[in-house]
C-alpha cells in the first residue's frame, strides 16, 4: 500500500527424504529378508480384496484327504469381463480386464462419502481406549474392518475370512534422531499392514447385538475390544522388529530394480484383483491442532476438514481417512466404482460410525473367566499348522459354565427329540483328523444311557490317481476298503441338567453341552426331526493348567445345507461366546459324494470300540 517492495520470503530448508533418514545404516540382509518373507506370506494368504458380489456362485467342493482347504470367498471365480493380456501384462497374467469394460483401470471412478462422530462420543471412546490400553487409531481400524466385512461378502460366504488392513503410519515417530521435518511440509508417511479374521457381516451383527442384548450371552458377542488389542499387538510387533526401516528399504529396492510402477499399472487390470491388494486402508491423521481455539478465524469457523486418496487404479477395496477437528472425528470413506457402488460405500461409512458409537457406549462388557490370547483374531492356532493335533492357545481362559454360554432362545430340552442321526457340518476338535469326512453321529437312547456312534470316512474321498499296492483296494461292490472308522462315545443323560450330557471317550469324562437348537421347517419336512440343527460344546481343563481341550460341533439332520445356515451357526457360536474357545478355528466337513454306514447296529458294525478303530465287518467295512 505504501509502495514499498515486499522482501522475498526466506526459503526453509528442504527436508530429507525417507530414504535419507532411514537407510543410513548398513544393510541387514537377514532383517530385510525376514520382512520380505513376512510380506510375501501376508500377500499370498487368501484375503477379501474384492466384494463377493463380483464373484460367481459357489460350486460344490470336495475336501480331498490329501489337501484339505477351508472355503473362502477368493476360491469363487470372478465375473469381470476379460480379454487376452497384451504387452507387458502377458508376463504377469494370461487374461486382463476387457478394454471395453467399465472395470478397466482407466475407466474406474473415485467415490467419497463424508461422516462425522460427535465430540462427546469421541471423548467417551477415547476414555475407553485408554482403559483397554489401545489408541484411537486401533478403534478406528477395528470399526473399519467390521464395516468392510459388511460390504465385502454375500450370502454364499460363510465361516471366517481374512481381512487385510493397510494402516497409514507417521514415520517421524520412528526416525533414529526424532522428527527431522522441523515443522515444514514434508513427505513423512509410511504404512504397515496386518490381517484379522472375522465373520462376514460382523458390523451388522455388532449393531444387532447392541439393539437386542439377548442375542448374545454375557461372555459372547462381536469382540470389539479384543479386535482392538489384536490390532495393537500387530502394530507393536512391526515396531519392535524394526520394520519401519525395512519397509522403506524394500519399497526403495522395488522402485529402483523391479519397475514397481509398471507392475502396479499392469496389475491394475488383473481381473482377479482389480488392482486391489488390501481389504481396507485406514489413515488416522490425529488431531488437527494448527487452528485457533474453537477453530475460529474472525467471523469464520473451521467446521470440518476431509481428505482422501485416489484408489481408481490400485489400492484397497475401500478406504477411510480420518482427522479430528474441534473434537469431532471427520471420516472420509472412499472407494472406486464399479468395484463398489454408492450404496456400498454409504453402508461402509454408516457401519464405521455406528460401530464406534456402540463401542463408546459399551452397555454390557464381556465377563469371561480369564482373557484369551491377544493375537487370537490374527492367528487362533498360534502359528501351528491345522494338521498338527494341538489344542489352540487359550490364554488365561478357564472352562465356562453352561449357564454362561447357552442360548436364551434354547427351547426346553427334550432328549427324545435330540437323539437320532446327526451329520457334522464343522468341528473344532483335535481328536478328529482334518483329512476325514462324511462324519455322522447316530445317537440311540437306552434309558439314561445314550449310545453315540461316531462314524467317519478317512481319508475321504481318496484322491484319484494315487492308488497303489500299499492300499487295501476295493470290494466287490466297488467301495474302498478300510476307510470307514467308528468310535462309541457313550453319553449319560442328566435330567437335573437339561441340555447337558456326561460323555465318555478317549479315556476322559466331560460334559457335552447343547448350547443352541434350531427348528427349520424345511429340514423337518424332509427328515421328520423337530430339532434340525444344533451346536455342541465340550471343555476340559483345570485352574492350574488352564484349558487343555475344547470341542465344538455344528450338527444338522441333513448332510448338506445352504451356506447361509452354516454362516448362521458361526455367528451364533460367536454370540454365545465360543470364538476364543475355538469357533474361529473350525474345520468344515464337506459331505459331497459321501456314503454312510447303512447301520450302526452291532449286527452289522461289530463291537463298539471306545477308541477310533476301522470297521472290519461287511468286507472290511466297505458295505455301505
Image (cartoon, grey):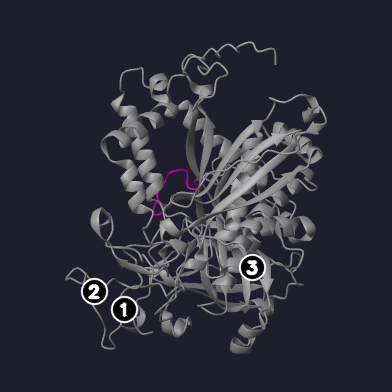
* Disc 2 crowd, CA 10 A, few/some/many (<14, 14-19, 20+): few
State which tag comes first along the sequence, 3 or 1.
3
The quarter of the displayed image where residue 536 is located = bottom right
Instruction: Tell me, yes or no, if residue 72 can be seen here.
Output: no
Quadrant in which the C terminus appears: bottom left
Q: Is residue 380 magenta?
A: yes
* Disc 3 crowd, CA 10 A, few/some/many (<14, 14-19, 20+): some
Q: How many badges with numbers are in the image? A: 3
- Residues 573 and 184: in front is 184
Q: Determine whether the residue tagged by mark 3 lies in a helix, strand or loop.
A: strand
Q: Position of residue 203 (x, y in %)?
A: 65, 55
Q: Position of residue 97 (x, y in %)?
A: 36, 63
Q: Determine whether the residue tagged by mark 2 lies in a helix, strand or loop.
A: loop
The residue at 55%/58% (across/down) is: 551
State which tag comes first along the sequence, 1 or 2.
2
| The magenta segment | 379-388
The quarter of the displayed image where residue 33 is located = top left
For disc 3, the marked residue is 492
Q: Can you name the residue that lies furthest to the front here?
A: 3
- Residues 55 and 321: in front is 321
For disc 1, the marked residue is 620
Q: Position of residue 82 (x, y in %)?
A: 35, 68
Q: On the picture, is 60 further left or further right than 181?
A: left
Q: On the picture, is 384 further left or further right than 136?
A: left
Instruction: Tell me, yes or no, if residue 144 can be seen here.
Output: yes
Q: Can you name the residue that lies furthest to the left here?
A: 469
User: Alpha carbon of mark 3 to alpha carbon of mark 1: how far?
Assistant: 31 Å
Q: Position of residue 65 (x, y in %)?
A: 34, 66
Q: Is residue 368 magenta?
A: no
Query: Does residue 64 sit above or below 20 in this rendering?
Result: below
For disc 2, the marked residue is 472
Amino acid at each position: 500500500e505504501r509502495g514499498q517492495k515486499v522482501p522475498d520470503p526466506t526459503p526453509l530448508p528442504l527436508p530429507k527424504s525417507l530414504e535419507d533418514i532411514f537407510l543410513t545404516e548398513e544393510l541387514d540382509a537377514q532383517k530385510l529378508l525376514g520382512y520380505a518373507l513376512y510380506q510375501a506370506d501376508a500377500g499370498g494368504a487368501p484375503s477379501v480384496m474384492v466384494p463377493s458380489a463380483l464373484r460367481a456362485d459357489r460350486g460344490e467342493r470336495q475336501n480331498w484327504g490329501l489337501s484339505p482347504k477351508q472355503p473362502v470367498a477368493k476360491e469363487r471365480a470372478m465375473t469381470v469381463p476379460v480379454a487376452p493380456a497384451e504387452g507387458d501384462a502377458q508376463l504377469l497374467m494370461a487374461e486382463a480386464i476387457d478394454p471395453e469394460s467399465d472395470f478397466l483401470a482407466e475407466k474406474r471412478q473415485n467415490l467419497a462419502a463424508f461422516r462425522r462422530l460427535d465430540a462427546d462420543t469421541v471423548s467417551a471412546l477415547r476414555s475407553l481406549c485408554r482403559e483397554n490400553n489401545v489408541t484411537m487409531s486401533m478403534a478406528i481400524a477395528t470399526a473399519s474392518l467390521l464395516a468392510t466385512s459388511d460390504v465385502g461378502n454375500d450370502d454364499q460366504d460363510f465361516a471366517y475370512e481374512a481381512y487385510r488392513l493397510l494402516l497409514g503410519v507417521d514415520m517421524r515417530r520412528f526416525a533414529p534422531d526424532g522428527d527431522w521435518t522441523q515443522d515444514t511440509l514434508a513427505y513423512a508417511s509410511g504404512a504397515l499392514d496386518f490381517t484379522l479374521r472375522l465373520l462376514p457381516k460382523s458390523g451388522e451383527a455388532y449393531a444387532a447385538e447392541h439393539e437386542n442384548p439377548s442375542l448374545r450371552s454375557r461372555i459372547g458377542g462381536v469382540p470389539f475390544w479384543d479386535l482392538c488389542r489384536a490390532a495393537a499387538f500387530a502394530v507393536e510387533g512391526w515396531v519392535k522388529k524394526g520394520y519401519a526401516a525395512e519397509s522403506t528399504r524394500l519399497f526403495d529396492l522395488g522402485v529402483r530394480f523391479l519397475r514397481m510402477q509398471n507392475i502396479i499399472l499392469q496389475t491394475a487390470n488383473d481381473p482377479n484383483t482389480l488392482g486391489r491388494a488390501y481389504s481396507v486402508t485406514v489413515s488416522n491423521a490425529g488431531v488437527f491442532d494448527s487452528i485457533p481455539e474453537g477453530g475460529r478465524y474472525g467471523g469464520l469457523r473451521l467446521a470440518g476438514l476431509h481428505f482422501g486418496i485416489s484408489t481408481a487404479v490400485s489400492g484397497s477395496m475401500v478406504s477411510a481417512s480420518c482427522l479430528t477437528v474441534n473434537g469431532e472425528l471427520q471420516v472420509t470413506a472412499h472407494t472406486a466404482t464399479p468395484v463398489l457402488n454408492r450404496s456400498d460405500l454409504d453402508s461402509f461409512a454408516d457401519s464405521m460410525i455406528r460401530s464406534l458409537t456402540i463401542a463408546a457406549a459399551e452397555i454390557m462388557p464381556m465377563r469371561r473367566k480369564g482373557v484369551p490370547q491377544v493375537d487370537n483374531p490374527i492367528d487362533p492356532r498360534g502359528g501351528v499348522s491345522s494338521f498338527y493335533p494341538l489344542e489352540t492357545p487359550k490364554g488365561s481362559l478357564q472352562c465356562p459354565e453352561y449357564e454362561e454360554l447357552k442360548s436364551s432362545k434354547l427351547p426346553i430340552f427334550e432328549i427324545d427329540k435330540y437323539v437320532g442321526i446327526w451329520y457334522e457340518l464343522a468341528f473344532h476338535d483335535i481328536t478328529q483328523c482334518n483329512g476325514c469326512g462324511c462324519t455322522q453321529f447316530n445317537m440311540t437312547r437306552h434309558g439314561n444311557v445314550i449310545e453315540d456312534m461316531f462314524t467317519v470316512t478317512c481319508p475321504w474321498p481318496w484322491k484319484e490317481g494315487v492308488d497303489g499296492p500299499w492300499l487295501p483296494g476295493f470290494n466287490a461292490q466297488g467301495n474302498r476298503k478300510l476307510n470307514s472308522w467308528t468310535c462309541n462315545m457313550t453319553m449319560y443323560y442328566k435330567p437335573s441338567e437339561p441340555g447337558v450330557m456326561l460323555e465318555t471317550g478317549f479315556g476322559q469324562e466331560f460334559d457335552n453341552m447343547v448350547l443352541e437348537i434350531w427348528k427349520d421347517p424345511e429340514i423337518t419336512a424332509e427328515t421328520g426331526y423337530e430339532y434340525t440343527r444344533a451346536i455342541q460344546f465340550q471343555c476340559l481343563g483345570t485352574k492350574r493348567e488352564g484349558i487343555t481341550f475344547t470341542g465344538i460341533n455344528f450338527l444338522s439332520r441333513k448332510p448338506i445345507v445352504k451356506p447361509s445356515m452354516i454362516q448362521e451357526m458361526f455367528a451364533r457360536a460367536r454370540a454365545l461366546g465360543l470364538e476364543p474357545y475355538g469357533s474361529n478355528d473350525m474345520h468344515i466337513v464337506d459331505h459331497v459324494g459321501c456314503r454312510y454306514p447303512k447301520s450302526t447296529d452291532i449286527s452289522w458294525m461289530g463291537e463298539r470300540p471306545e477308541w477310533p478303530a476301522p470297521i472290519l465287518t461287511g468286507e472290511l467295512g466297505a458295505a455301505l
